[in-house]
Amino acid sequence: MMRHESLDPRRMRRIGTAVRIFSLAAIGVTCVGLAWLGADPDRFARYARSAVGVNVGQLSVLSPGYWLALALAALPAGPFIQAMWLLARLFRRFEQGHVLEQANAATMSRIGWLFVAAGIATPLSRMLQSVALTYDGTQGGRQLAVGLDAGSFGMIAAGVALFGFGLVLREAVRLARENDSFV
């Protein structure tokens, strides 16, 4: 465990606090957004038409497809929420001066993989939602919507970049330890 003393502690605290607040706010907005989306069947139907890409009529909260589709909406949220939680914890460690550590490198790589998982889960979730929302429909009314969006690709790209930064940090920790052993 190495403490990096050359970093300005006040600046690290400000940055760390800002990132932690943003990360925790992102978790809150995601959870509230999911609850808000599912609280009104008409709102959920509008979401299904715009985001999922299916043409649904009146949705009923009594329909199993409604609840399945709502649960599937949470599928990409899980890895995103976990990534934001880990990001908040990582920046808390940075605030405390713990920067060049293997645990931080592993956490950064894990955050990257969670972003990739969320980016992949989004189109899969929407595809499965299209089936769930139209399954009870009449013959010929069932739909399978497949769509890709820039947000999913952006999430995957950000995840790959964070994973790569985690590998770079891991190597930096190794080199720093090696250099410390020569002194």
Image (spheres, rainbow, N blue to C red):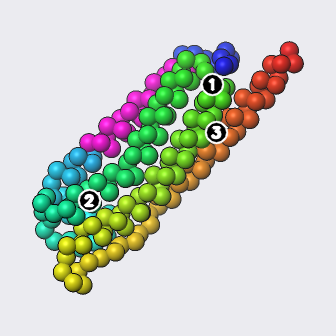
| Mark 1 surroundings within 10 Å by alpha-carbon count, few (fewer than 14), some (14 through 19), many (20 or more) | many
Mark 2 to mark 1 CA distance (whole Å): 42 Å
Q: Earlier in the sequence, mark 2 or mark 3?
A: 2
Precedes in sequence: disc 2 or disc 1? 2
Residue at 23% across / 46% down in the picture? 35
What kind of element bears circle 3? helix
Up-down: is 105 above or below 38?
above
Q: Quadrant of the C terminus?
A: top right
- Tell me, for residue 99, which label it has, or none: 1
Which mark, by number, is residue 68? 2
Q: Which residue extends farthest right? A: 182
Q: Nearer the viewer, mark 2 or mark 3?
A: 2
Q: Which residues are magenta?
A: 11-32
Mark 3 or mark 1, earlier in chain:
1
Label 2 CA crowd tier, 10 Å (few <14, some 14–19, many 20+): some
Q: Which residue is mark 3?
A: 166
Taking the image as drawn, is residue 158 in sight?
no
Q: CA distance from mark 3 to mark 1?
A: 12 Å
Identify the residue at horizontal 36%, vertical 38% (top origin).
Answer: 27
Q: Position of residue 34 (x, y in %)?
A: 27, 48
